[in-house]
Structure formats: C-alpha cells, structure tokens
Amino acid sequence: MATKVFMEALSPTMEEGKLVKWLKNEGDAVKSGEPIGEVETDKAIMELVARGDGLLRKRLVNEGESVAVGTLVGVIAAADENIDALVSGAAAPAPAAAAPAPENVSAAAQPATDATPQSPPPAQPQGEASAPQQKAATPPAPVASTPAPQTTAPAPSGGTTRSSPLARRLASERGLDLNAVQGSGPNGRIIKRDIEAAGTGASPVAMAPAGAASAPRAATGGAATADFTDVPLTNIRKVIAKRLGESIGPIPTFYLTAELDLTRVMEMRKAMLELGDEFKVSVNDVLLKAIAVALSQHPEVNAHWLGDHIRYFNRVHLGMAVATDDGLIVPVIWDADRKRMSEISREAKELAKRARERKLKPEEFTGSTFSVSNLGMFGIDQFTAIINPPEAGILAIGTSEDKLVVIEGEAVIRQRVRVTMSCDHRIVDGAVGAKFLQALRRLVENPLMLVY
C-alpha cells in the first residue's frame, strides 16, 4: 500500500519547512525510518524519514522550496502500484469559493516542555486543514545567480492544472485564475513563486538545479547597481519575529539590575585551573550554575504563564541564548542546578557549537524554564533582554570589569559584573524578583556554596 510523505512538524513551533536536500532519488528503495531528505525547520536542519517501505515513486517538492507542515511532498509505493490518484490529488486545484484553510495549531499549541515531534496523520486527505495560514506577502525564494531556463509544460489533459497546495491558497487569496498562470515547477506545476510573479507581472524563474550557486534576488531585478537587496526570511528568523512580537507588547515587563562582585569567583577559577584543564571553567559557567541554584531556591521565578494558570517547575532547565548566522536560538541545559560546573561547562560549549551548525535535536532547544543571555564578550556593560514566552523572566549578563568600589570605608579595585532581570509582572512581583537577585548575589560572591 502506498505511503504518503508529508512535511512533518519536526519541532514544536514549526509551521513550515524548507526541503534543503533530497537524500533519495525517484525509484530508490527506502525502508521505514530511513532518512529520505533534509529539512530546514525554524530551529535546525533535520532529517525527514520514511514512514513506510517501498520505492520513492514521486518527489512533489523541489530542493530549496518551503512548504507548510502537512503538505504532501512525496509518495512511497511498490514498483507496480498505481499512484496516479495520489499524485493528481496533490495537484488538484482548490475551488474558487473555498475559504482559506484554518490555522494548524497542532505544533504551536503544544506546551513548551513538549519536545516530541508531531507528524500529520498518514490518512489525512490532501487539501484539508493541514497547513497553517500564510500571508500573501511572503518574500520570494532565492533564485540562482545564473537563471535556469524556464521549464514549463501544458496542463495535463482533462483540464486539470497542476499546482501546489500553497500556490492554490495564494491564488485564492489574490483572486487569480490558475489556468492563466504559467507553472515553472516540475512538469509545469504551479508553485508559490509563479503566483507571486503573476501578481507583480514578472516572469517566474525556474528553480536552479541542486548544487547551483545562489544569491538573493535584487529588488530591481538583480542589477548590480541596485540600491538595495531583498533577502527572504529564513524559518528561524520568522519564528524570532513572531515569538518576540508576542513578548514585548502583551507581556507587562519590568526590569531589575544588580551589580555582583566576581573577586571570589576569579580566585576559585584560578585554584581550579591549578588542578588541571578538566577543572577549567569560565565566568559564564559559574554564573549559569549560580543562576540555576538560585532558581531552585526560588521556584516562583522558575515558572511559565499559561493563560489561565501559572506552572511552577520543580526542575530547572536553563535556556542559554546563542547567536547564529541565521538568528538567535536557545539551547537548554536540563537539570542545570543538579550538575557540576564542569558538566555545565562541557554541555554549554557542545550545545553552542551544535546550535551554530544547525544540528540541535528538538529536545535540545525546547523545554526551558528560564533563560539567560550574555553579551559580556562583546563589551556590553548592561542591557535588557526580551522574555521568551511563556517563561517568567530572562537574565541579561553584561561584561565583567575592574571598578573602584568602597568596602568597609576603604577604596579598593574589584571585578564586577552587572546583570539585569526582565520580569513578567503577571508572575513575578518586584519583591520576588529582588529576592531572587539577592540569592544570586550571595551564591556568586560566595562561590564555594556552589560546590559543597
């Protein structure tokens, strides 16, 4: 029996995926669980696996094309099995009067702690509410720097116009007649860029072959003297915009700043280094451990706002913001309060490396109960960070520097660091946030408490 290959929700917040690379060609044998493609999600590049045995009879999405979660991207079947109904069903045009597909909330509605990837039901008919609503102003996909010749073909006999589900939805939203649009996809299939080109009067450009060099499309048609260049959003940048747009506006946020003395932290680091490289830790590692322990002592800060209730966590899963070429991602150190500083140091380095390589697994970037952002390495004295919903707060760490301070009436030079906590006032009151920072100061300024 034929198996439909859907664009799966490979992360809890994924709404669309970009088919980066097919790992199998049409006609190749595949087994259930075997990777058949690579998909760029909103967080990482992950494998799309087969859900059945047979041959990869049809690939319905080009490499480099983004489609909504739930879209049929391929068909697995026996060599002699008739798949015409499946393939034609994927290309059938939507009725002109059909209402836009409702939002797919299967991924977005999951709690932040749920790291299990969700897959669309295999028996779901194509064209039903499997794809989230997309705006008509989605930026055009990148094209090859040397445009490939158009590959158009007449519509199949019987009056059926081959088109992708996304193209049909965009055409319905814009009131375009699919019969009047030239397709540049495989076998003349109408895809998203054809609808966008039809709306602007431009000619669609065929997808470049896999491996061809690509460059962003210039706003003036690619002229070298263009005043600006439009670059399509990556999936991760789309999610950043959406998530942070949900944060700073609706969340009533206030900020608390404290300055911590790092003198004893520096002394402890020096003593640990003398014991060998395996005991080497950074100031950031010590701060992560101290924050995690302070959160375990103040569970009222280690919480999520879930609309009609607040969830207080008994375990501390610390998210640490990591800057990548594509945007910000927050890997998670699970049970950080229970781990030694050396364990936190190794895990933090490995997670940051995997984040920049886009190789994180879903369970490595979901489920955080509180987050930390450190810009001290860039020489930033202090800053305020935006809360990652539904968390109660985030701690921003600035650079450490020598300062002249007065201690017991005597002027001395001490190494200090400023931290600023952004608090969701629906969960954390001012006094609660202040007590958390008091606990953090006590731990940082007496770091032996972290190793007892």
Image: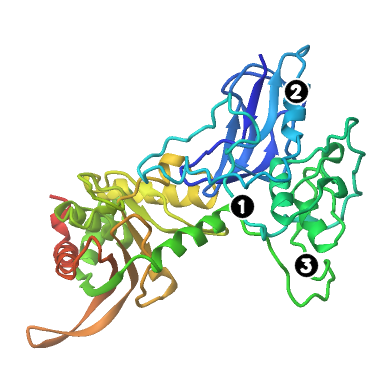
Task: Judge from the rendering whether residue 162 lies leftward or rightward of residue 248; answer left or right.
Answer: right
Q: Circle 3 is placed at which residue position?
A: 218
Total numbered badges shown on the rendered structure: 3
Which residue is rendered at x = 73% and y = 56% of the image? Answer: 174
Mark 1 or 3 closer to N-term? Answer: 1
Do the numbered discs 1 and 2 sit on residues whose CB atoms are within 8 Å? no
Q: Residue furthest front?
A: 97
**Secondary structure beneath label 2:** helix
Among the 4 quarters of the image, the one containing residue 53: top right
- Between 371 and 300, the one nearer to me in the picture: 300
Disc 1 or disc 3, which is closer to the eye? 1
Could you tell whether 76 is left or right of 369 in the image?
Answer: right
Instruction: Please give the residue where the numbered disc 1 appears in the rendered image.
Output: 134
- Name the amino acid type tagged 2: Ala
Q: Residue 250 falls in which quadrant of the image?
A: bottom left
Could you tell me which quadrant the N terminus lies in? top right
Residue 64 shows in this picture: no
